[in-house]
Amino acid sequence: SAGLFRGPDRCCREHDQCWAQITALQFNYGIRNYRLHTVSHCDCDARFRRCLLAINDTVSNIIGVTFFNLLEVPCFVLEESEECVQWHWWGGCERYGVVPLARMVQQSQYHPSLPVE
């Protein structure tokens, strides 16, 4: 029965390999993810959505609706920000640098285009 899940499984595996993620309760890109699941870069979530919509079967649509509509998992974009990257021992900033900071984005709902029976 692996055949039924092969398409959606590929979408999920590809999504898990996202180049920029903040795992549950982890601090990364200047913010802490207080959710109990990983949040990913918006590019990865957009690819995940397209992958599921392209399959457009019962399983892929359940995954899409759960992820985007029920859990309402946000995604994030990275914005360059000037931050202190090296501190003096007494607490002042010794050196500033440009670092990527995450900004959370609320995602749109998942709308599968179900074939007409």
Image: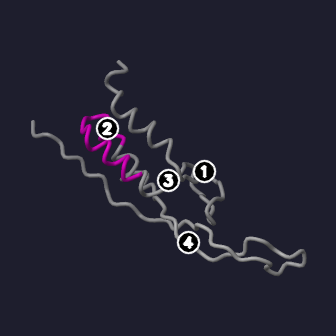
Q: Give the residue displayed 33% in from the left and 31% down from the top.
A: 7
Residue 2, above or below 16 = above
Q: Give the residue displayed 58% in from the left and 66% down from the top.
A: 100
Whether pointer 2 and pointer 4 mark residues with C-beta atoms closer than 8 Å, the reply is no
Q: Amino acid at mark 4?
A: Glu
Whether residue 115 appears in magenta in the rendering, the answer is no
Residue 86, above or below 34 = below
Which residue is identified by label 1?
A: 24
Q: Position of residue 63 (x, y in %)?
A: 36, 41
Q: CA distance from mark 4 to mark 3?
A: 17 Å
Quarter residue 13 falls in: top left
Q: Earlier in the sequence, mark 1 or mark 4?
A: 1
Q: Earlier in the sequence, mark 2 or mark 3?
A: 3
Secondary structure beneath label 1:
loop
Q: Amino acid at mark 2?
A: Ser
Whether residue 62 appears in magenta in the rendering, the answer is yes
Crowding at dot 4, Cα within 10 Å, few <14 / some 14-19 / many 20+, comes out as: few
Per the rendering, the mark at residue 60 is 2
Whether pointer 4 and pointer 3 mark residues with C-beta atoms closer than 8 Å, the reply is no
Q: What kind of secondary structure does the magenta stretch mostly adopt?
A: helix
Per the rendering, the mark at residue 75 is none
Whether pointer 1 and pointer 3 mark residues with C-beta atoms closer than 8 Å, the reply is no
Which residue is identified by label 4?
A: 80
The span picked out in magenta is: 45-63
Q: CA distance from mark 2 to mark 3?
A: 19 Å
Which residue is identified by label 3?
A: 40
Nearest to viewer (mark 2 / mark 4): 4
Q: CA distance from mark 1 to mark 4?
A: 23 Å
Whether pointer 1 and pointer 4 mark residues with C-beta atoms closer than 8 Å, the reply is no
Q: Earlier in the sequence, mark 1 or mark 3?
A: 1
